[in-house]
């Protein structure tokens, strides 16, 4: 209830209101696994790169200008983006949505963000028939040595 | 296992491969509630507007050029975006990510996408201190009559 009130309150705030990051992070509505989704977007082109998940501890360690880390749901551990492939993301901006359950990271992505070698993970375009619209930078064969 | 193989397979496809939407939708990895997240992005500006959820039936009814609907987790029912506020989204493009568990809808948003009256739901900017960076189009007081 307290969390709901916080986000209701800020709906009626106007421009340039400030409050501490601590209050915001305490108000986030983590799911049953203690996670929320993070949309990752290339900061200058606006391309949506991927969707990942994060928990409170990783978010508290997240710093503007540094490498981005997420929570790997498949491996059940913290995962620094690019730790194996070298294709890191440097964090430019962080946004939280209106009801406190989704983050948007604007990043500078080095090389492909996708394990497939594409810049973006969203390369399956659904039309009347689906079509792969890959913009491959590198073959996945060469991404992990 | 079949789902995993499908997405593994397409990693190594090259340009302009086509397959039926039905195969793709059957391969989607729905969560325990039968949902996956949808990132909604303004098709021309690239602004990320919101994150919502969708199920298989709603996705099967989703058509390019028409209104967008989602699954409301709070109200447990299908929810046509803008059904109350009139601030609808017309669907331009649909993308599925590399492992089949997140969608990206590129839309044309009429008016604000956010119930707060902002174009985007992502108006809480986390800096050293958090700051609300609203780009209000309309006050929420006037959005729902």
Image: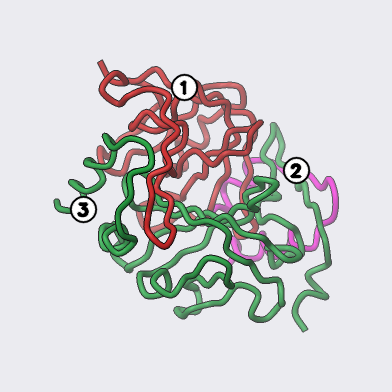
Chain colours: A green, B red
Tally of numbered tags: 3
Residue at 58% in and 33% down: B42
Residue closer to the observer: A93 or B91: A93
Discs 3/2, front: 3
Q: What segment is highlighted magenta in the picture?
A: B1-28
User: In terms of secondary structure, where does tag 3 sit?
Assistant: helix
Give the labeled residue for mark 2: A131
Determine the chain carrying the residue at label 2.
A
Bin the neighbour count of mark 3 within 10 Å (Cα to Cα): few under 14, some 14-19, many 20 and up: some
Give the labeled residue for mark 1: B111
Quick one: which residue is furthest to the left in this view?
Answer: A1
Give the labeled residue for mark 3: A3
Identify the image quadrant of residue A40: bottom right
Task: Give the answer, above or below, for where B94 lies relative to B2.
Answer: above
Identify the image quadrant of residue B75: top left
Instruction: State how far apart marks 1 and 3 are (Cα).
Output: 27 Å
**Is A20 on the left or on the right of B42, as rendered?**
left
Give coordinates of residue A139: x percent, y percent.
Answer: 83, 67
Bin the neighbour count of mark 2 within 10 Å (Cα to Cα): few under 14, some 14-19, many 20 and up: many
Give coordinates of residue B67: x percent, y percent.
Answer: 50, 23
User: In terms of secondary structure, where does tag 1 sit?
Assistant: loop
User: In terms of secondary structure, where does tag 2 sit?
Assistant: strand
């Amino acid at each position: 209830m307290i969390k709901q009130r916080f986000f209701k309150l800020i709906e009626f705030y106007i421009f340039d209101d400030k409050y501490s990051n601590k209050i915001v992070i305490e108000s986030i509505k983590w799911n049953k696994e203690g996670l929320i989704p993070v949309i990752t977007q290339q900061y200058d082109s606006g391309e949506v790169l991927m969707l990942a998940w994060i928990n409170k501890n990783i978010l508290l360690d997240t710093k503007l200008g540094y490498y981005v880390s997420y929570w790997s749901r498949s491996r059940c551990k913290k995962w620094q983006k690019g730790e194996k492939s070298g294709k890191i993301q440097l964090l430019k901006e962080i946004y939280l949505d209106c009801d406190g359950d989704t983050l948007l990271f604007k990043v500078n992505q080095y090389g492909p963000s996708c394990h497939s070698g594409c810049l973006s993970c969203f390369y399956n375009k659904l039309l009347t028939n689906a079509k792969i619209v890959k913009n491959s930078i590198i073959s996945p064969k060469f991404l992990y040595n």
